Image (cartoon, rainbow, N blue to C red):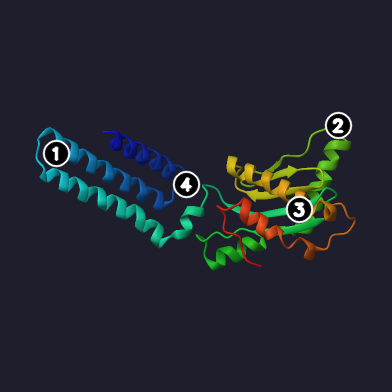
Amino acid sequence: MLGLLIFVFGAFVHFNAYKFTREKITLIQAISMVIIGLGFIVGFVGGDIFRNSDFHDISDAVKIVGMLIFAIIYIIRIDFIYRLPVNVYFILVFTKIGLNVHISRVLDTSKTANDESQSNKTLINENLLSSLISAISGLLNESLGSTKNLRAIIAEDRTIVLDTGMYSTCAILCDRPTHFLEKSLSNLRKSVEVTFQEKLIEPTIIKEDFKEIDDLIRKNFPFLLIENK
């Protein structure tokens, strides 16, 4: 019965995920969980209650079908394990005074080539964006009396999440923030400052000196597919 409860709970979670994301793969995962749960029911009712050993074989066959469906999803769509329930567009790194250091764009394999091209056209220039964020942060600190760092810029369908330290700010553009995005962004900012502290305080930025940031981003965001430059 414990196995049945586990897979019923798994089906419940995946059905709720489908209601939220409307991704067909999540629905298929939920159905595969239901099939595995039915396998446990067949084995329990037929094999344990009615003492018919044939039902144990049927139970195992049903479970195998459910597990095969679940496994085939990742064989066909291996990138699915990297997906989040929200869209992520790019990760930006810049200095405290607004000098752009690095930008990494995030791939969305669910988009067509035309969609991806159109999406990239709508992205603001990273140099302008980093300067704008620094200007807004400075306005809050100097003119409005805020002593805290700017944490987010929120629109109805987009959010820029920010994490600011002593020497740099890291930003990520997404549909809405999640716990893992915010945690990974904080870890990235700390890694950037530890690795490039001396270069971040210089009055000019040479982007060639920050090539290793790509590796830091992939390390701190293993669940995202980063566009190769």
- Label whose residue precedes the other's in the sequence (2 or 1): 1
Residue that label 2 marks? 145
Snapshot quadrant of residue 36: top left
Q: Give, as a three-letter code, the residue at label 2.
A: Gly
Q: Amino acid at mark 3?
A: Thr
Q: Is residue 17 visible?
A: yes
Q: Name the residue located 79 percent from the left edge and 54 percent from the top edge.
A: 196
- Distance between the alpha carbons at the discs numbered 3 and 4: 37 Å
The image shows residue 18, relative to residue 6, as above or below, that is below
Q: Earlier in the sequence, mark 2 or mark 4?
A: 4
Q: Position of residue 203 (x, y in %)?
A: 90, 56
Q: Earlier in the sequence, mark 1 or mark 3?
A: 1
Q: Which label belongs to residue 47?
A: 1
Residue matched to label 3: 195
Amino acid carrying mark 4 in the image? Thr
Q: CA distance from mark 2 to mark 4?
A: 40 Å
Q: Residues within 10 Å of mark 1 (few under 14, many from 20)?
A: some
Does 118 sit above or below residue 50?
below
> At 76% across and 49% down in the image, what residue appears?
194
Q: Is residue 146 left or right of residue 9?
A: right
Residue 195, position in %: x, y? 76, 53
Is 36 left, or right, of 131 in this rendering?
Answer: left
Q: How many neighbours does mark 4 have within 10 angstroms: few (below 14), some (14-19), or many (20 or more)?
A: some
Q: Which mark is residue 12?
A: none
Label number found at residue 21: 4
Does residue 123 appear in the picture of this structure?
Answer: no
Q: Earlier in the sequence, mark 1 or mark 4?
A: 4
Label 2: few (<14), some (14–19) or many (≥20) C-alpha neighbours in 10 Å? few
The secondary element bearing badge 2 is classed as loop
